[in-house]
Structures are given as C-alpha cells and as structure tokens.
Amino acid sequence: MKILNLIALMGRVAPELAREHAGDEVLTISPFDAAFDGGTLVKCEIGSLTYALALVCQLIKTKCEFFGSLDTALLSGESNVGEEEAEEIVEFLQGCELILVDSTELAHHPDAANLRALIGIMAKFSGAVVRDENGKEYDFSALRVEELVPLSSFDGCVVMEHTQDARFVGSAVFAMAAKLRDGMNARITTANGVFERKFELDITMKGTIALLGVCDAGAPDSADARANGASAPDTADTRAATLCEYPFQLCKIEKI
C-alpha cells in the first residue's frame, strides 16, 4: 500500500499504527528526522505543513488562479521543502491509497481550515482515503483554500505534546539548549498547561524538538483531591489527557 503520512512522529505517538504499516510504501512529511522507521522523509519546518502542502497543490492545480498567485519561493523557503521534493510528492500521490493525518493537527493547527482543504485537494488528485490515527475517515473534497495564515515563529525551546505517555524526552541538542541533564526534574509550561516531569535524554533522537507526554494516569483527579479536603495542583496533569492547543509548543522550562 502507498501511504502519504502527515503524522509528525507516528512511531512514537501512534506506535500501533506504525507497526501496522511497517511493510508499506510510506512517504512522510515531518519536522522530525526519525518521523517513521522506514520509507521516505521530506523534512519541513515546525508548523509549516500548510506551506509545504500548498507547494504540492501548486503543482496539482496548475490552472488555478489562487495557487498561481502564491509565491513559490516563499512557500519553499518558509517550509524548507524544495520544489524538487514537491514534485516527488506529487509523483508519489499518483496511486497513493491512504493519507494519514493527525487529528490534533486537523483540530488545532493555526491554519486548520486550509490544512484540511489542502489535504482534500491531494486526496481528490490521488483517490486516496484520508484517515486519522484513530481510524476516523474524512472527506475534505468540498473545502476551498483561502489566504494562507502566516507561519508562527518557533525560536526557543519547542516540545511536541502527545497523549501516549507522561514522559519528557529529548535529544542531546535539546538538552543543551534547555540546560537540562538526564534525570533532572523540570517544570514545563506551555499553552496546554503546566507539567512536572523528569527529563529523559534519548541519544537516538536528533534535532531541537522534545516530546512531552501529557497523559498521566497516576495524577490525582481534581474532584478526588477536593473530596479529600485538598486543593488540586494547578497543573494540566490533573486534567483529562487531551490537547486543546496545537501540539508543537514553545515552552518555558524551569529546573525543580
């Protein structure tokens, strides 16, 4: 099966799905070097998926006035996806059967409406089914692309939040930037909340993005805490393990 994978780090955040498609022909677009164990990787900048996909859709919708008006050099420069790579993606889409998407990205990407519409164009072009990590299928074919939202800046310490576990894992490069050592306790503040975690150094990881798991089954529920006469701590660890913001977040890190 030919699969276009838009889940940034499928092997970590959707391991069962990664195992299911381990033998398939997979092309991944992601800011992570090790986004999927196997297949082809087109690496993009953090938060730039809409620009990368717009670059692809320019080649698909060659007679469309909107896509013709887009600055190809800007899309390529901001996303860090080359025009030749975009051509490779279009070629891959021919005969592609499945486009895998991240439900959190669909809901909380800063330009979510255009992200869905761009995926719809690629799905219609290829005939592929669009499916998220939970198995839900989508039809975005009727959506229209509007003016693209300018990309946000991610200068600083960046984490990708997920709901698979409660670990805080990063590379040696991230540890250096955040001034952390393996086993050091830290308080991480993002738009999704405040999390207290022990930092785990993963020497196999590359790049400057750390993984922050927000699923903490062991954390006391706020209602239980109040029933026992205690105040629930003001952290996201007391809430349900769901993300209410874009998973890629600039963060503030404090040693504790």
Image (cartoon, grey):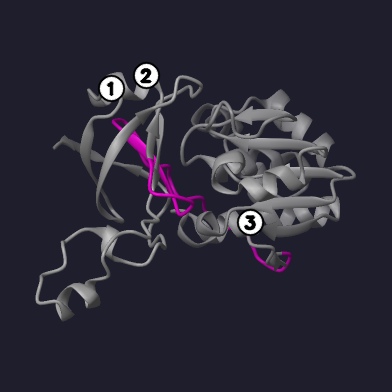
Q: Residue at x 41, y 32 (%)?
A: 209
> Pointer 1: residues within 10 angstroms few (<14), some, or many (20+)?
few
Q: Give the amino acid type for the residue marked by disc 2 in the picture.
A: Val
Q: Quadrant of the N terminus?
A: top right
Q: Quadrant of the C terminus?
A: top left
Q: Are marks 1 and 3 in contact (CB under 8 Å)?
A: no
Q: CA distance from mark 1 to mark 3?
A: 31 Å
Q: Quadrant of residue 220?
A: bottom left
- Helix, strand or loop status at disc 1: helix
Please name the residue that numbered disc 1 is placed on: 177
Identify the residue at the far bottom of this view: 227
- Helix, strand or loop status at disc 3: loop
Q: Are marks 2 and 3 in contact (CB under 8 Å)?
A: no
**Would residue 220 appear left or right of 113 to someone viewing this image?**
left
**Would residue 102 appear left or right of 188 to someone viewing this image?**
right
> Pointer 3: residues within 10 angstroms few (<14), some, or many (20+)?
some
Horizontal and vertical percent position of residue 225: 18, 72
Q: Nearer the viewer, residue 166 or 50?
A: 166
Taking the magenta stretch, the answer to whether it contains residue 220 is: no
Q: Nearer the viewer, residue 3 or 180?
A: 180
Taking the magenta stretch, the answer to whether it contains residue 146 is: yes
Please name the residue that numbered disc 2 is placed on: 173
Horizontal and vertical percent position of residue 228: 14, 77
Residue 239 — which label?
none
**Would residue 54 appear left or right of 108 to someone viewing this image?**
right
Please name the residue that numbered disc 3 is placed on: 133
Q: Quadrant of residue 177?
A: top left
| Magenta-drawn segment | 141-167
Q: CA distance from mark 2 to mark 1?
A: 6 Å
Q: Are marks 2 and 1 in contact (CB under 8 Å)?
A: yes
Specify whether residue 77 is in view: yes
